[in-house]
Image: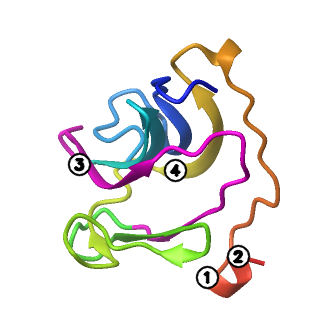
């Protein structure tokens, strides 16, 4: 993909039903201006970027998202590993407490959304849902 291609998402923690959902997709990975960004949407659907790095193209990248699913922003949280390294987020911690659920169901949704999808080859392999980082990173 072109280094500067903007996508709305390459991954979404997608909320269902979306009709009337406050967050709709509380957590997303996207590309923008040559960066790979982890986004969080609050219950007013305001986006923040708790982590970003320069986008690497034409190479395998690994992501592990640790998450405690909760409607309560004091209980729910996200953690993020990029290429096997746990990342420090914008709050200068490795865990961001936030609301991660506002409707009945959320599930992981991989695939390029938005931007010029004809310019992107997005391969996904070894998807896991696990209880620990070690299980997910195998």
Discs 4/2, front: 2
Residue 42 to residue 10: above or below? below
Residue 69 rendering spot, x and y as whole percentages: 43, 67
Residue 131 rendering spot, x and y as whole percentages: 63, 82
Discs 1/3, front: 1
Looking at the rendering, the stretch of residues picked out in magenta corresponds to: 42-69
- In the picture, measured across the screen, residue 95 lies left or right of residue 106, that is left
Residue 82 rendering spot, x and y as whole percentages: 54, 65
* Classed neighbour count for the residue bearing mark 1: other residues with Cα under 10 Å, few (<14), some (14–19), many (≥20): some
Q: Which residue is mark 4?
A: 105
User: Real-space Cα distance between discs 4 and 1?
Assistant: 23 Å
User: Real-space Cα distance between discs 1 and 3?
Assistant: 25 Å
Q: Residue at x 47, y 38 (%)?
A: 30
Most foreground residue, 23 or 34? 34
Marks 4 & 1, CB-CB < 8 Å contact? no
User: Real-space Cα distance between discs 4 and 2?
Assistant: 24 Å
Marks 4 & 2, CB-CB < 8 Å contact? no
Q: Which residue is mark 2?
A: 137
Q: Which residue is mark 3?
A: 42
Quarter of the image where one finds residue 99: bottom left
Q: Which residue is mark 1?
A: 133
Discs 3/4, front: 3
Seen from this angle, which residue lies furthest right?
125
Q: Residue at x 44, y 47 (%)?
A: 54
Describe the element under mark 1 as helix, strand or loop. Answer: helix
Residue 107 to residue 93: above or below? above
Q: Earlier in the sequence, mark 4 or mark 2?
A: 4
């Amino acid at each position: 993909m072109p280094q500067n291609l903007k996508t709305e998402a390459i991954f979404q923690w997608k909320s269902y039903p979306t009709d009337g959902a406050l967050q709709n997709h509380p957590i997303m990975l996207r590309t923008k201006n040559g960066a790979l960004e982890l986004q969080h949407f609050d219950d007013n659907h305001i986006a923040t970027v708790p982590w970003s790095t320069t986008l690497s193209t034409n190479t395998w990248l690994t992501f592990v998202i640790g998450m405690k699913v909760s409607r309560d922003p004091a209980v729910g949280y996200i953690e993020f590993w990029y290429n096997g390294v746990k990342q420090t987020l914008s709050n200068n911690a490795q865990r961001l407490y936030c609301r991660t659920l506002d409707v009945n169901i959320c599930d992981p949704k991989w695939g390029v959304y938005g931007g010029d999808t004809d310019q992107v080859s997005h391969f996904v392999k070894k998807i896991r849902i696990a209880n620990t980082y070690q299980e997910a990173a195998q």
